[in-house]
Amino acid sequence: MIKIYYPSYPFKIREPERDKEEIWDVLRKQWVRLTPEEWVRQNIIQYLLQVKNYPASYIAVERRMKLGELNKRFDLLVFDKAAQPWMLVECKAMDEKLDSRVLWQVLRYNIAISVKYIVITNGEECYAFVKTEKDFIEIAALPAYDE
């Protein structure tokens, strides 16, 4: 497991007319509903930007992808310097257990979007894996962007 120390960040949160809190997403440049999963996603985004220095322009947030006949959405996709998919990040709410079901979910996404790194997190726990010739193996830290 990777221990992540999230940086301090002045998140913008508002409560519009329907009593549903929203948070400003700096990457999508829009207000989004503040769900427990979104809170984890926004914190990992700030970690990738501030601590790991991943370029904001190379991170896609919640985009559709086709998985066979199904339409799915990934949480985060980081592209490498050649603009190729490099890392998939799956975010879950803090009270959701990171088990084989979550890992298999992102491994299925990897069928549609092949990446070198896979990350799963619920904010408290974080696991990362790197693709080898035959399998994905767990790694002890998120890679630097320039790797």
Image: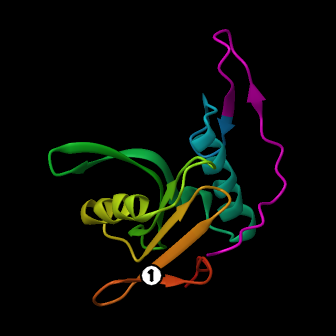
Return the x and y of residue 14 as percentages of the image width and height. 75, 24
Where residue 129 appears, as percent x and y from the top left, is 47, 78
- The structure residue drawn at horizontal position 68% and vertical position 71%, both measured from the top left corner, is 52
* Up/down of 132 relative to 114, above or below: below
Name the kind of residue labelled 1 in the image.
Answer: Val
Residue 113 visible in this rendered orientation of the protein? no
Residue farthest left in this picture? 69
Q: Position of residue 82 (x, y in %)?
A: 42, 73
What span is colored magenta in the figure? 1-23
Marker count (numbered) = 1
Q: Residues within 10 Å of mark 1 (few under 14, many from 20)?
A: some
Residue placed most toward the observer, 100 or 117: 100
Instruction: Tell whether position 21 is magenta.
Output: yes
Q: For residue 1, which quarter of the picture?
A: bottom right
Which picture quadrant has residue 145?
Answer: bottom right
Residue 7 among magenta residues: yes
Return the x and y of residue 96 as percentages of the image width and height. 55, 50
Near-viewer residue (73 or 82): 73
Q: Which residue is drawn at 40% across and 45% down?
A: 63
Q: Name the residue under label 1.
A: 130
Label 1 SS = strand
Question: In front here: 51 or 107?
Answer: 107
